[in-house]
Image (spheres, grey):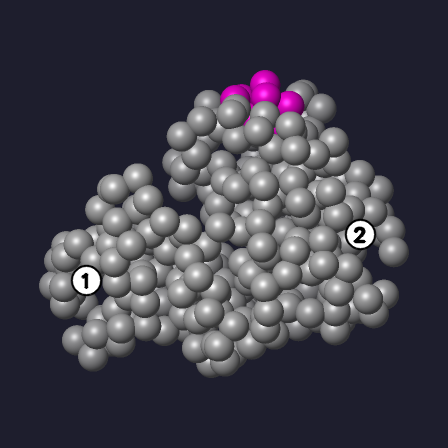
Amino acid sequence: MRTQVCEMLGIDQPIVQAPMAAIPGLAAAVSNAGALGMLTLTWSEDVGADVRNTAALTSRPFGGNLVLTEDRHRRVDQALEAGLRIVSFMWGDPSDYVDRVHDGGGIVLHTVGSAKEARQAVDSGVDVVVAQGWEAGGHVWGGIATLPLVPAVVDAVAPVPVIAAGGIGDARGVAAVLALGAQAAWLGTRFLLAKEMPIHEDYRHALIAAAETDAEMYPNLYEVGWPDSPHRALRNSTSKAWGAAGRPPLARRPGAGDVIGHFASGEAIVRYEPAPPMVGTTGEIEALSMWAGQSVALARQAQSAAEIVTELISRL
């Protein structure tokens, strides 16, 4: 099923892998399956290299995401120079970046949490609006659930295409948001279980075992470096200890500053750091940030990215 947004982005299936890390192998695998793979470029050490490495693995379109908590012009320029042509923004005003992306022959996506924000994004020149419901995992921009948000945004910005995000975990969810007027579905948690996503096996097992109630929303549990950054992650010993202490600020939290793990590189991970356990991570894996959305109850097995895409479109 090809929608207007599929035509615009050059993809065959109305599925977008939410940006969760700069993992060229995952993004390329999703794109090779006919959907849109995405990279997180906000914290990339070499934006150009990540884009080029992904392009070496696929001839299909893929995108890159940037969180607008500070100036990102240099990273946008690096991404465009490396050949990226689908640029996604979140958590800020995209208006200063739209012309630059368009001048580079690119398309701009922007994540919103309300119809008002959607209209503002379109007024700034954004090409595609991503309506993110609060059920989403990772960093969550708005506070409205996907079911009421998507049609409100669709009506507010028509004929600009809308992609639905938040709480979508299987083919039923994809069909549902298309029925609401969205032209594609944006999924993160389900793709965490893709075999191409190099997360720690304990993280993978925790996702598979989780219920929908285990993915909790936190105002600032894992300090990400900017204020007002709510996020959703699996409940664990770190979150329980924080809650039992009354959710104090970082300086007064139980175990703040304790080294509880190490990356494969040997770099230390301290408690309350937004560092999910990846392949090669060692230490107290259960206590690290395991990002997940409420759709986690629908993620029940590890599959290839291609198998996930095929299953997601099976009811269209």
Q: Which residue is mark 2?
A: 13
Separation of disc 1 and disc 2 at Cα?
44 Å
> Is 55 located above or below residue 64 in the figure?
above
- Please, what secondary structure does the residue beneath circle 2 have? loop
What's the magenta bit mostly, secondary-structure-wise? Answer: helix
* Residue 221 percent across, percent down from the top left: 30, 63
Task: Give the residue type at disc 1.
Answer: Pro
Residue 79 belongs to magenta span: yes
Task: Give the residue type at disc 2.
Answer: Gln
> Is 166 located above or below residue 61 in the figure?
below
**Which residue is depicted at the point 50% across and 40% down?**
22
Numbered marks: total? 2
Q: Could you say which is closer to the camera, residue 162 or residue 115?
A: 162
Residue 221 horizontal side relative to residue 162, left or right: left
Q: Residues within 10 Å of mark 2 (few under 14, many from 20)?
A: many
Residue 125 horizontal side relative to residue 230, left or right: right
* Residue 205 percent across, percent down from the top left: 46, 69
Q: Is residue 241 visible?
A: yes
**Which residue is depicted at the point 32% across and 67% down?**
286
> Is 199 located above or below residue 101 in the figure?
below
Mark 1 or mark 2, whichever is nearer to me: 2
**Which residue is depicted at the point 65% across and 56% down?**
304
Q: Which residue is mark 1?
A: 249
Magenta highlight range: 77-84
